[in-house]
Amino acid sequence: MKNKKLKSALTGFAYLTPALLILLVFRIIPIFFSVRISLYDWGMAGARQFLGLTNYFRVLQDPVFWQSLLNTFWYAIFSIPIMFILSLFFAILLNQKIKGLGFYRTLYYLPVVTSIVAVSIVWKWLFNPERGLLNYLLSFLHVSTIRWLEDPRGIFTLIFNPLHINLPTILNGPSVALCSVILMSIWKGLGYNIVIFLAGLQNIPTAYYEAAKIDGAGRFRLFRNVTWPLLTPITFYILVMSTISAFEAFAQVWIMTGPPAGGPLGTTKVVMYYFYEQSFELWRLGYGASIAFFAFLIILALTIFQRQFLEKRVTYA
């Protein structure tokens, strides 16, 4: 009996070995190597001077890093709730029995499988102030030209300035340029969340709805007392993954706001782009690795926070 268990365990490990090796080579080893790099003044010229924790202290005193972190938080604060609400709304609509349902589901998911580079280039053209489609359509409403990707003003500043309310710099909100990038990102990622929500909706037993209807529940009560509680596992997953994805935003900023990327006035420079800029444009690999490590710590802290305070509210059927 013991030999059979041992043989079964060894067989299982044998099947897992290729995946574990890939994980080790391409994930675990690079993490430790990047931590090592962060302790050096590591450049491309070959000079590697040991600095200890100096890079980390420099990051904490770097105003550009804090600005990029603020931009990233604005990106997350605006993109996650809007994408969450829209994806749940469209998932509920696509869960109905209507004609052409497969076509609509495919249509919503197409942006997800489209290259982020191709999508960013197309949206950059849409946002073009002179030849872009959005300004052309707005011209019929007699709206003046909006310089979507070139306006560094915060949206809260634009809202409250006519009311003669002056906000501190940190509360100016995301710039018009960053809001444009957020709009594209929402469009690009919406289909993925819709599919996840749709899977959750279709996994809810119809018996629950039938029992609630017998008790006289209307649509709102059905959603509040049946649909929403049973979607909390999906909600928890989407919030965690959306937060991680928001802090990893890079390609759309690099393509849509350049050259040089991160403009105007650094208002779209998110943490991942700042890491890329320091590491692969200025070739300050040690400093870039320390920025990446701080980003990792922030994502880890947010994930732990979500597990502590949101997972308790998850309802399993």
Image: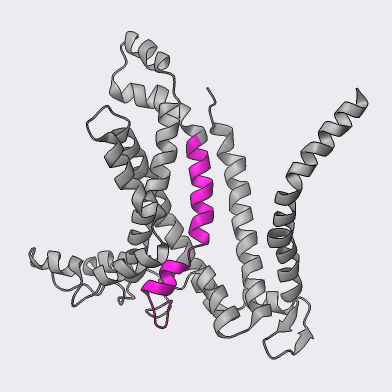
Q: Find residue 51 and report its image quarter.
A: bottom right
Q: Position of residue 15 (x, y in %)?
A: 74, 42
Front residue (pair 94, 222): 94
Asked if residue 246 is among those painted magenta in the image, a careful observer would answer: yes
Task: Please tell me whether residue 153 is drawn above or below residue 32 in the rendered image.
Answer: below
Q: Position of residue 31 (x, y in %)?
A: 71, 64
- Residue at 46 percent across and 73 percent down: it is 269
- Residue at 29 percent across and 23 percent down: it is 219
Front residue (pair 185, 125): 125
Can you see residue 300?
A: yes
Task: Please tell me whether residue 204 is drawn above or below residue 211 in the rendered image.
Answer: below
Q: Find residue 222 and report its image quarter.
A: top left
Query: How many marks overall?
Result: 0
Q: Position of residue 188 (x, y in %)?
A: 37, 56
Q: Is residue 139 left or right of residue 162?
A: left
Can you see residue 166?
A: no
Q: Main secondary structure of the magenta part?
A: helix
Q: Is residue 28 left or right of residue 255?
A: right
Front residue (pair 244, 95): 95
| Residue situated furthest top in the rendering | 214
Asked if residue 25 is among those painted magenta in the image, a careful observer would answer: no
- Per the rendered image, the range of residues in magenta is 234-262
Task: Please tell me whether residue 270 is drawn above or below residue 296 in the rendered image.
Answer: below
Q: How is the image coloured?
A: one colour
- Residue at 63 percent across and 47 percent down: it is 304
Q: Is residue 29 left or right of residue 316?
A: right
Q: Quadrant of the N terminus?
A: top right
